[in-house]
Image: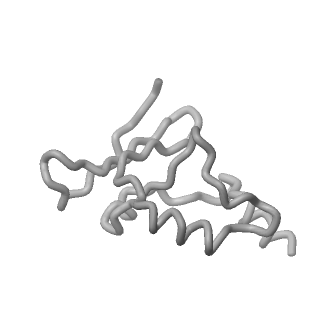
Amino acid sequence: MALRFLGIDPDSPTDESPTIWLHEETGDLLIQSYRATEAEVNDCKEVGSIPGHSTDVPDHETIIRLPAAMLDYLPARRDGDGGGEAERAASSA
């Protein structure tokens, strides 16, 4: 697997390490961070996402809480990279 380390939360204690890696072949991000609390998951379900999309979290997925400092390590999207479903829907409206 062609992973590249992008960053670690500089304010995290030694035994807690929110970290981000980039899979260089797919462009996917692998993120280690804090598991969202049950209250946070319930808040996410209440807010929802796009119409018709389930708010349930499948067993093979989880919701994580990423510290704001980690946003500095997210790679910027470049023109032509494509976008998520919401971005595509907004651009076709």
Q: Residue furthest right?
A: 93
Q: Residue furthest left?
A: 14
- Which residue occupies the foreground of this view, 74 or 18? 18
Q: Position of residue 77 (x, y in %)?
A: 57, 58
Judged left or right of residue 25, residue 36 is left
Question: Residue at 49% across / 45% down in the picture?
Answer: 29
Q: Position of residue 34 (x, y in %)?
A: 35, 54
Res 89 quadrant in image: bottom right
Question: Residue at 80% across / 70% down in the picture?
Answer: 91
Q: Residue furthest top?
A: 1
Judged left or right of residue 86, residue 58 is left
- Which residue occupies the foreground of this view, 39 or 64? 39
Q: How many marks?
A: 0
Res 53 quadrant in image: bottom right
Q: Position of residue 78 (x, y in %)?
A: 59, 58
Examine the rendered structure and indicate whether residue 31 appears above or below residue 44.
above
Judged left or right of residue 64, residue 77 is right
Q: Position of residue 22 (x, y in %)?
A: 45, 41
Question: Residue at 19% across / 56% down in the picture?
Answer: 12
Judged left or right of residue 15, residue 69 is right
- Which residue occupies the foreground of this view, 45 or 89? 45
